[in-house]
Amino acid sequence: MMRAWILPMLLGFCGSLVAIGLFRQGSPGEAAAILLMFVLLAGVNSPLVFPRSIGALEAQRHSAVDGRPVVYWRPGCRYCLRLRIRLGRSTRQLHWVDIWRDPDGAAVVRAANEGNETVPTVVVAGRPHANPDPEWVREQLSPPA
Protein backbone atom coordinates (compact mmCIF):
# COMPACT_ATOMS: atom_id res chain seq x y z
CA MET A 1 0.00 0.00 0.00
CA MET A 2 2.75 2.44 0.93
CA ARG A 3 4.59 1.83 -2.36
CA ALA A 4 1.70 3.37 -4.32
CA TRP A 5 2.03 6.63 -2.39
CA ILE A 6 5.81 7.12 -2.71
CA LEU A 7 5.70 9.19 -5.92
CA PRO A 8 2.77 11.41 -4.83
CA MET A 9 4.40 12.05 -1.44
CA LEU A 10 7.74 12.81 -3.10
CA LEU A 11 6.06 15.26 -5.50
CA GLY A 12 4.25 16.98 -2.63
CA PHE A 13 7.43 17.23 -0.57
CA CYS A 14 9.53 18.60 -3.46
CA GLY A 15 6.80 21.07 -4.37
CA SER A 16 6.68 22.27 -0.79
CA LEU A 17 10.44 22.80 -0.69
CA VAL A 18 10.44 24.75 -3.94
CA ALA A 19 7.46 26.84 -2.81
CA ILE A 20 9.10 27.63 0.54
CA GLY A 21 12.25 28.77 -1.26
CA LEU A 22 10.28 31.00 -3.63
CA PHE A 23 8.21 32.41 -0.77
CA ARG A 24 11.36 33.31 1.16
CA GLN A 25 12.73 35.05 -1.94
CA GLY A 26 9.64 37.26 -1.99
CA SER A 27 7.60 35.55 -4.71
CA PRO A 28 4.43 34.35 -2.94
CA GLY A 29 2.37 34.21 -6.15
CA GLU A 30 4.95 32.11 -7.93
CA ALA A 31 5.32 29.91 -4.86
CA ALA A 32 1.56 29.28 -4.77
CA ALA A 33 1.49 28.44 -8.50
CA ILE A 34 4.41 25.99 -8.19
CA LEU A 35 2.90 24.36 -5.12
CA LEU A 36 -0.45 23.99 -6.89
CA MET A 37 1.27 22.41 -9.90
CA PHE A 38 3.11 19.89 -7.70
CA VAL A 39 -0.06 19.06 -5.74
CA LEU A 40 -1.93 18.43 -9.00
CA LEU A 41 0.89 16.20 -10.24
CA ALA A 42 0.82 14.30 -6.96
CA GLY A 43 -2.94 13.85 -7.21
CA VAL A 44 -2.80 12.58 -10.78
CA ASN A 45 -0.11 10.06 -9.83
CA SER A 46 -1.94 8.85 -6.75
CA PRO A 47 -4.23 5.82 -6.49
CA LEU A 48 -7.13 8.24 -5.91
CA VAL A 49 -7.48 8.88 -9.65
CA PHE A 50 -8.31 5.26 -10.40
CA PRO A 51 -11.44 3.31 -9.51
CA ARG A 52 -11.23 1.04 -6.48
CA SER A 53 -8.92 -1.88 -7.16
CA ILE A 54 -9.92 -5.43 -6.46
CA GLY A 55 -7.88 -8.62 -6.31
CA ALA A 56 -6.97 -10.51 -9.48
CA LEU A 57 -8.97 -13.59 -8.56
CA GLU A 58 -12.06 -11.52 -7.75
CA ALA A 59 -11.66 -9.54 -10.99
CA GLN A 60 -11.39 -12.76 -13.02
CA ARG A 61 -14.53 -14.13 -11.35
CA HIS A 62 -16.48 -10.92 -12.04
CA SER A 63 -15.22 -10.81 -15.63
CA ALA A 64 -16.32 -14.39 -16.23
CA VAL A 65 -19.82 -13.47 -15.06
CA ASP A 66 -20.32 -10.05 -16.69
CA GLY A 67 -17.84 -10.24 -19.59
CA ARG A 68 -16.16 -6.95 -18.75
CA PRO A 69 -12.40 -6.55 -19.31
CA VAL A 70 -9.88 -6.62 -16.47
CA VAL A 71 -7.22 -3.88 -16.36
CA TYR A 72 -3.96 -4.58 -14.54
CA TRP A 73 -2.27 -1.31 -13.60
CA ARG A 74 0.06 0.34 -11.09
CA PRO A 75 0.23 3.86 -9.63
CA GLY A 76 2.67 6.23 -11.31
CA CYS A 77 2.35 4.54 -14.71
CA ARG A 78 1.76 7.24 -17.31
CA TYR A 79 0.27 4.75 -19.78
CA CYS A 80 -2.21 3.59 -17.14
CA LEU A 81 -3.09 7.22 -16.45
CA ARG A 82 -3.54 7.88 -20.18
CA LEU A 83 -5.90 4.89 -20.41
CA ARG A 84 -7.81 6.04 -17.34
CA ILE A 85 -8.23 9.61 -18.59
CA ARG A 86 -9.12 8.68 -22.17
CA LEU A 87 -11.76 6.20 -21.02
CA GLY A 88 -13.48 8.82 -18.87
CA ARG A 89 -16.65 7.54 -17.25
CA SER A 90 -16.24 4.17 -18.94
CA THR A 91 -13.58 3.25 -16.37
CA ARG A 92 -16.30 2.17 -13.98
CA GLN A 93 -17.26 -0.59 -16.39
CA LEU A 94 -13.84 -2.23 -16.07
CA HIS A 95 -12.38 -4.34 -13.28
CA TRP A 96 -9.14 -2.68 -12.07
CA VAL A 97 -6.32 -4.63 -10.39
CA ASP A 98 -3.38 -2.76 -8.84
CA ILE A 99 -0.40 -5.09 -9.35
CA TRP A 100 1.52 -3.41 -6.53
CA ARG A 101 -1.20 -4.37 -4.07
CA ASP A 102 -1.99 -7.80 -5.47
CA PRO A 103 0.77 -10.38 -6.04
CA ASP A 104 -1.63 -12.57 -8.03
CA GLY A 105 -2.28 -9.67 -10.39
CA ALA A 106 1.45 -9.09 -10.83
CA ALA A 107 1.87 -12.79 -11.63
CA VAL A 108 -0.87 -12.61 -14.28
CA VAL A 109 0.85 -9.62 -15.91
CA ARG A 110 4.27 -11.30 -15.87
CA ALA A 111 2.81 -14.47 -17.38
CA ALA A 112 1.16 -12.45 -20.16
CA ASN A 113 4.22 -10.30 -20.94
CA GLU A 114 7.18 -12.70 -21.02
CA GLY A 115 8.12 -12.04 -17.39
CA ASN A 116 7.76 -8.25 -17.57
CA GLU A 117 5.31 -6.22 -15.53
CA THR A 118 4.08 -4.23 -18.53
CA VAL A 119 1.03 -2.20 -17.63
CA PRO A 120 -1.65 -1.46 -18.44
CA THR A 121 -2.42 -5.01 -19.44
CA VAL A 122 -6.07 -5.44 -20.37
CA VAL A 123 -7.55 -8.95 -20.39
CA VAL A 124 -10.56 -9.33 -22.67
CA ALA A 125 -12.25 -12.73 -22.93
CA GLY A 126 -9.19 -14.39 -21.41
CA ARG A 127 -6.72 -12.79 -23.87
CA PRO A 128 -4.17 -10.27 -22.53
CA HIS A 129 -3.36 -7.07 -24.42
CA ALA A 130 -0.39 -4.98 -23.25
CA ASN A 131 -0.85 -1.21 -23.42
CA PRO A 132 -3.81 -1.26 -25.82
CA ASP A 133 -5.27 1.83 -27.45
CA PRO A 134 -7.94 3.39 -25.19
CA GLU A 135 -10.42 3.55 -28.07
CA TRP A 136 -10.02 -0.19 -28.63
CA VAL A 137 -10.69 -0.80 -24.93
CA ARG A 138 -13.83 1.37 -25.16
CA GLU A 139 -15.01 -0.72 -28.13
CA GLN A 140 -14.65 -3.86 -25.99
CA LEU A 141 -17.14 -2.37 -23.52
CA SER A 142 -19.84 -1.98 -26.16
CA PRO A 143 -22.23 -4.88 -26.58
CA PRO A 144 -21.82 -6.68 -29.91
CA ALA A 145 -24.26 -5.49 -32.57
Image (cartoon, grey):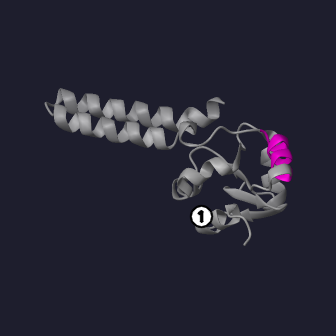
Give how far across and how far down residue 98 sits, in percent: 69, 42
Residue under the point 37% across and 39% down? 38
Q: Position of residue 96 (x, y in %)?
A: 69, 46
Is residue 81 among the parts visible in the rendering? no
Where is residue 104? Give x, y as percent: 83, 43
Q: Residue at x 63, y 34 (%)?
A: 3
* 49 sits left or right of 110 in the view: left
The amino acid pointed to by label 1 is: Pro
Visible residue check, residue 60 = yes
Rendered position, 82 above or below 12: below
On whether residue 56 falls in the magenta region, the answer is yes
**Where does the image place residue 116, in percent across and percent down from the top left?**
75, 57
SS for callout 1: helix
Residue, far bottom:
145
In the depicted structure, whether residue 49 falls above or below residue 145: above
Q: Nearer the viewer, residue 125 or 5?
A: 125
Is the C terminus in the top left, top right, bottom left or bottom right quadrant? bottom right
Q: Magenta stretch mostly in which secondary structure? A: helix
Residue nearest the viewer, comparing 125 with 131: 125
Q: Is residue 139 left or right of residue 65?
A: left
Magenta segment, which residues? Answer: 55-64
